[in-house]
Image (cartoon, grey):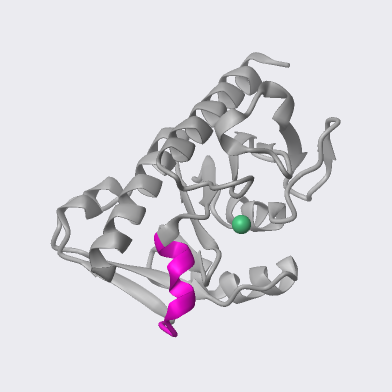
């Protein structure tokens, strides 16, 4: 393992422990990744409990989806790659199955608009509560290519989005570092809870 991979793996392991403590990755759900270079990422393996990750549970993959290592990538790896391919400034993608994102199963909303909250400042590029942040909700689909297609329009929209929700499933958020993406995970779950009560 080179030094960058060791550092990134350690940060992904810590992210898993924190998100597990926050009950945002129940059972073996969720997956995390971080950029190693222009064309390479580190990613958590399929079927691992994110609260108990070790270095063996992290694999490397190029942006075309070729991976190396003894463990397999998550079925949702394509959604991580889609974000890295579209956003060269992004260095980390975290996917959780938080309670609030899962509860969107009970609604038919196509998006959630978070507006006027101080905690919006936890998202990269938002500097005041006088902002609105739209979080699109897409329908769940076991066909990852189909899911990626329904997400593509939001990644190219004129409005900057920092996260999307997959209905009844969970959310994805991304940032320039693992630390920032982790902050966004915690903030988004908190704000979704504020909206639903
Ligand atoms: Zn998932």
Q: Main secondary structure of the magenta part?
A: helix
Residue at (52%, 41%) from the top-left corner? Answer: 92
Q: From this viewpoint, which residue is outermost toward the front?
A: 27
Q: From this viewpoint, which residue is outermost toward the bottom?
A: 108
Q: Nearer the viewer, residue 109 or 164?
A: 109
Q: Is residue 44 above or below residue 191?
A: above
Q: Nearer the viewer, residue 47 or 80?
A: 47
Counting from the top left corner in percent of width and height, residue 128 is at: 15, 54
Q: Which residues are magenta?
A: 100-109
Left or right of 122, for residue 96: right
* Quadrant of the picture in which ligand 1 is shown: bottom right
- The quarter of the picture where the N terminus appears is top right
Residue at (72%, 66%) from the top-left corner? Answer: 144
Counting from the top left corner in percent of width and height, residue 72 is at: 81, 41
- On the image, which quarter does residue 79 sit in? bottom right
Judge whether residue 13 is colored magenta. no
Residue at (67%, 52%) from the top-left corner? Answer: 81
Q: Is residue 84 above or below residue 179?
A: below
Task: Inspect this view and state whether residue 177 appears.
Answer: no
Q: Nearer the viewer, residue 123 or 169?
A: 169
Left or right of 78, for residue 176: left
Q: Nearer the viewer, residue 9 or 106?
A: 106
- The quarter of the picture where the C terminus appears is bottom left
* Count of numbered labels shown in the rendering: 0
Task: Inspect this view and state whether residue 166 appears.
Answer: yes
Left or right of 22, for residue 82: right
Counting from the top left corner in percent of width and height, residue 146 is at: 71, 74
Counting from the top left corner in percent of width and height, residue 100 is at: 40, 62
Residue at (72%, 39%) from the top-left corner? Answer: 45
């Amino acid at each position: 393992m080179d030094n960058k991979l060791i550092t990134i793996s350690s940060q992904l392991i810590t992210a898993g422990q924190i998100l597990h403590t926050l009950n945002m990755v129940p059972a073996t759900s969720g997956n995390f990744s971080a950029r190693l270079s222009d064309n390479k990422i580190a990613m958590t393996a399929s079927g691992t409990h994110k609260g108990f990750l070790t270095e063996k549970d992290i694999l490397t993959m190029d942006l075309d989806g070729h991976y190396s290592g003894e463990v397999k990538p998550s079925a949702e790896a394509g959604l991580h790659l889609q974000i890295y391919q579209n956003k060269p400034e992004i260095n980390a993608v975290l996917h959780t199955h938080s309670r609030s994102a899962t509860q969107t199963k009970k609604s038919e909303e196509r998006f959630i608009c978070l507006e006027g909250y101080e905690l919006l400042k936890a998202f990269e590029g938002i500097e005041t509560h006088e902002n609105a942040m739209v979080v699109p909700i897409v329908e769940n689909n076991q066909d990852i290519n189909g899911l990626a297609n329904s997400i593509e329009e939001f990644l190219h929209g004129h409005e900057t989005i920092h996260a999307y929700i997959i209905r009844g499933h969970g959310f994805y958020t991304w940032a320039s570092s693992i630390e920032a993406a982790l902050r966004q995970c915690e903030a988004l779950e908190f704000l979704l809870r504020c909206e639903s009560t």
